Amino acid sequence: MANAILFDSTKCVGCRSCESACAEKWGNPYNEKIAAEEKLSSHKLTAVVTKGDKYIRRMCMHCMEPACASACPVGALVKTAAGPVVYDADKCMGCRYCMTACAFAAPTYEWEARLPKVRKCNMCAERLAAGKPTACSEACPNEATVTGERDALIAIAKARMAEAPQSYAQAIYGLNEVGGTSVMMIGPVPMAELGMPGKLPTEALPAFTWRALEMIPSIVTTGGVLLSGISWITHRRTEVARAERNERKGARQ
C-alpha cells in the first residue's frame, strides 16, 4: 500500500519541530529568522502557519495524480507507487510549468542561485524506502504529524473525529480533493479557514487537461501550444524580473 502523511491541526502546538527536522534532512539553514517565515521557499520545504490560536502545515501534498508531473515536459517529476512525488533535478530544464500547475503552490524555485532548481518536499522517499517515517513525523512530539499507509491513516483520522466530534470539522482534507492526495489533514475547522485552497474539484486535475485536448484537432493543438508557450514565456519573463527586483530589494534591507 502507498504511504501517506496525516496532519492533525488539533494536536499541533506550533513548536516547529517538523520544520527543523525537515531543514536538517535537506541540509537547509534554520534559525529564528527562518522559523518566522511562515511560507514555503527554496530553503523551507515545509512551513507551520499560525492562524490565530490554530496552526496549519504547508508542504507538497503529493497528489495521487499530480498536476505538476502531468505538466512537466521532461518527466522531472514522478508520482511513485510508494506515495511520494519525487523530483529529478538532472532532468529539469527550468520551465517551471510545475509551479503554475500545482493547486497548492508547493514547488518553489531557487531564484537566488546561479544554477537554480525547483525545490519541494519529497515526503522523505529514501526514509520511507528504508522503513522509516518521514523526518517531520519522527520529530513531532504530539503525533500531530504521522506517517503510515494511506488507508490506515484515513481510519485513524475517522476514529479521531468520531471520538471527539466536537473538536473536529467532519472532513478529511485531501481524501478527495483533486482526486486525493498523499498528505491529508484534519482540524477543528474546515482547512479552507486555515488557509488551504478551498472549493477544489474532486477529479484529478490532469484529467481536465487531457479531456480538453482530446476535443481539439492536432494542428490546432500544435498552434495553440506554440502560442501558449510564447505567452507563457513572456509572462514568465515579467515574473522573473519582478522576483529578481524583490530579491535585490530584500538583500538591501
Image (spheres, rainbow, N blue to C red):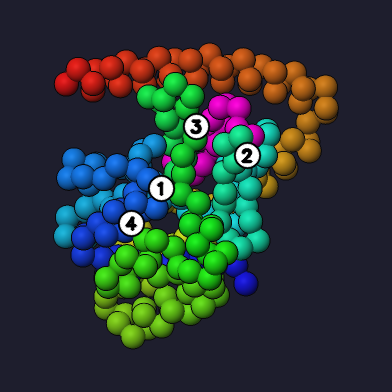
Image location of residue 117, percent across then percent down = 49, 32
What crowding class fits label 2: few (fewer than 14 Cα within 10 Å), some (14-19), or many (20 or more)? some
Mark 2: secondary structure: loop
Front residue of 224/19: it is 19
**Disc number placed over residue 21 in the picture, else none:** 4
Taking 184 as reference, is 243 above or below it? Answer: above
Q: CA distance from mark 2 to mark 4?
A: 25 Å
Mark 1 → mark 4, Cα distance in angstroms = 9 Å
Q: What's the amino acid at mark 3? A: Lys
Q: Earlier in the sequence, mark 1 or mark 3?
A: 1
Callout 2 amino acid:
Ala
Q: Which mark is residue 117?
A: 3
Question: Whole-percent x and y of residue 55?
Answer: 25, 58
Q: Amino acid at mark 1?
A: Trp
Q: Secondary structure at mark 3?
A: loop
Which dot marks residue 26? 1
Element type where label 4 sits in the image: helix
Residue under the point 49% across and 72% down: 148
Residue closer to the observer: 252 or 169 = 252
**Crowdedness near tag 4: few (<14), some (14–19) or many (≥20) residues, C-alpha within 10 Å:** many
Which numbered marker is on residue 177? none
Q: Report the Cα–Cα distance between label 3 and label 2.
A: 11 Å
Could you tell whether 223 is left or right of 35 in the image? right
Asked if labels 4 and 3 touch by Cβ distance under 8 angstroms, the answer is: no
Instruction: Assess whether residue 145 is covered by the magenta stretch.
Output: no
Q: Determine whether 77 is above or below 231 in the image.
A: below
